[in-house]
Amino acid sequence: MSARWRLEAADIRDEWLGHALSTLPADRPAAEAAISSLYELARHPAPRFTWVASPRAAMDLVPPSAGETAAFAGMNTLADLPLVQRLAALTFNLRRALDRRVGHEWDTPGWRTDLRQLDAMVSRPLQDAVHRIRSAMRSALDMRQRLTWYGQHDVSWIAHYDAWRRVGRRVYLPPEERQLTLWAAVARSCGWWWAGEEVCVISERPAVQRIEDLRPHNAGGPAVGFSDGFAVHAWHGTLVPEWVITDPTPERIAAEPNVEVRRCAIENLGWERYIELAELRMVAAAADPGNPGFDLLLYDLPEQTWGGMARVLLAVNGSAERDGSRRRYGLGVPVFLDDPVAAAAWTYGLSAADYSTLARRT
Amino acid sequence: MTVNLAILSQRTGLAVLDHLEKQVAIPVIDGLQAQGDLLIVPLRMIATAVSIDNWATWREVPADGFEVLRGAAGGNPHTLVADASTCHWTTQARDTFELAIGIFRNTKPAYMLHPEHGATGFSPGVYVVRRQRELGHSRGGRRLVAD
């Protein structure tokens, strides 16, 4: 049983994740060449290129496309379609053709059934990551009626076919290869882009991109930030206003209407610090049976903090962080629990007596 | 054979974080154990809450590992590792608390490996793998904890 293909798959995933998260200046000649070739494949003359510092800057240059619905009315051939739709059809057809080459993952010959996990290793995590980054950015932009190609944030489907070619030994036809190579070249060289009939607007890549566990997250600044100041903040994947990252205080937390944002702010401030500053009342403390040397602490929460009556259980991670410290984390528990051990047990659906037998925590 | 993190890491191809001790033997025990946001409970302890379907199919855990659960957003998987033909997994079970993600039964020691949390071992038996929950934000709701 060889685990070699997994290492190979992990390399492919990391390679594409690297492109998705790249903060290098765009490779303008490479991006322009690849996009021009894609225009050509869509039977359209190469455009002029306008580079912008961020997708927000592009919004001023990209008009919302007006006649999108009208295009379907008298459509007979691909040539009747506006360019954006021809490009979309190009990708759609390519992906449909490649899907046939890949086949269903369960069709993989018996001796390589382990390959069934290939998508779970490569395209799914990449898709999770880029979708989250994209939706974080989109929520800060007016994307209506603006058909967008995502450049570096388009890696998930490209990596999918790349992995099935390299690890799964799938063979694609030369024209398919050629088009896939073009999309891959775009993903490797620039940020988001908008295909106009005559002008193609392309954004630079961000100057900052931070993810943790494939979710946008940065405790020290924007999770995604561009050189012109366009930025979005995120806490473990949740989009938050800037103050949650830069200046979380009990006053701001109390005034925040969104419970999810409140929780992120508390986590950033730190549960211990929040409990101290907000002067929460401790209900009880007890030694954690599953985590020798560490305590479980139970506190009352102000009624609006958790969106209802709740208490918070403060527990300590079982394994140390890289720096040797142990992370303390808060878990919401029902208000009827008075005993910290019973509260910890409740989070796992056990009785306090059973939870007390916890033999080992890693 | 004494099993340590280095061996499990090599078998599964999963890299573990550098600060974890790789040469220490991993204890194999039969009690309740926790790994990150997962709790591994001997079935007998919660037999009143969890029942395995009569028609459940059991899937062999391959020697190079089986991903029980990917950590939040696919980052770090909890991976079950055992010698060939000694450990089987099913998800066809009911849990009153709806926290069980699956059940494994093993006839030789089995190990649960996580890149951040390290590894822990289970002596032969039947174990329920449960997730941790917390009170949700909407009144009375619940949500599962992901680390």
Image: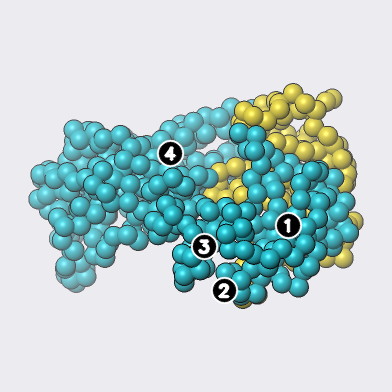
Q: CA distance from mark 2 to mark 4?
A: 40 Å
Query: The residue under label 1 is which amino acid type?
Result: Leu
Query: The residue under label 2 is which amino acid type?
Result: Gln
Q: Which chain is yellow?
A: B
Residue at position x 15%, y 61% in the image: A63
The number of callouts visible is 4
The residue tagged 2 is A304
Q: CA distance from mark 4 to mark 3?
A: 37 Å
Residue B62 as seen in the image, left or right of residue B2:
left
Q: Is residue B50 visible?
A: no
Tag in front: 4 or 3: 3
Question: Are callouts 2 and 4 both on one chain?
Answer: yes
Q: Position of residue B56 (x, y in %)?
A: 78, 58
The residue tagged 4 is A17
Give the label on residue A250, or none.
Answer: 3
Classify mark 4: residues with Cα within 10 Å, few (<14), some (14-19) or many (20+). many
Residue A322 as seen in the image, left or right of residue A214:
right
Query: Of label 3 and label 1, which has the lower sequence position?
Result: 3
